[in-house]
Amino acid sequence: MILGIYANRGSREEGRLAWLKGNPPTLETWRAVLGRRGFGPIEDAGWREKAFVEMPDVGREPAVALISEDRATFALRAESDWLFFGLGRKGGSGGATVKRELWERLGLGWEAVARFDRLELPAFHGLKTPKKAEWRDDRSLDY
């Protein structure tokens, strides 16, 4: 009986992992989720090379997502390449690279999307929303 319960749990876990690996979110989905939370792609090739050296070994799993300890840099393994996103960045450089031990694994595929949505991120004050102006009749005179 105990062996049957253990085998059932193992089988469920294997099935869940197989589904997550076989049905990862698309890159467009990730960009939409990240963009909604204020993350933009880091395009600086020099920074990306330095960051790649510091990435932890996650094997050959595609769709693995990592976030830095300070929650300002996000890394996604898409197929065989790492894609990097920074909080409040729209292209350009990524600032200082994140050390290997400061990356936190969010999970695999859709699990990572759900966990990222629940994360508390630092407040980013780079984009200001315009204040809503009170309507005023341009024909009126103020004294």
Image (tube, rainbow, N blue to C red):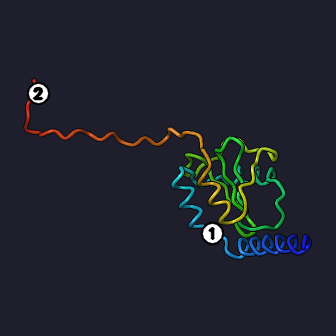
Q: Please say if 36 is above or below 10.
A: above
| Helix, strand or loop for disc 2 | loop
Amino acid carrying mark 2 in the image: Asp
For the C terminus, give its image quadrant: top left
Mark 1 nearby-residue class (10 Å; few <14, some 14–19, many ≥20): some
Dot placed on the residue nearer the N-terminal end, 2 or 1: 1
- State the image quarter where residue 26 is shown: bottom right
Q: How far from the left and from the top, in percent, is residue 76?
A: 69, 60
- Residue found 84% across the figure and 64% down from its top: 59
Disc tally is 2
Q: How far from the left and from the top, in percent, is residue 44?
A: 65, 52
Amino acid carrying mark 1 in the image: Pro
Q: Please say if 22 is above or below 37.
A: below
Reading the image, the residue beneath label 1 is 25
Reading the image, the residue beneath label 2 is 142
Name the residue nearer the viewer: 6 or 103.
6
| Helix, strand or loop for disc 1 | loop
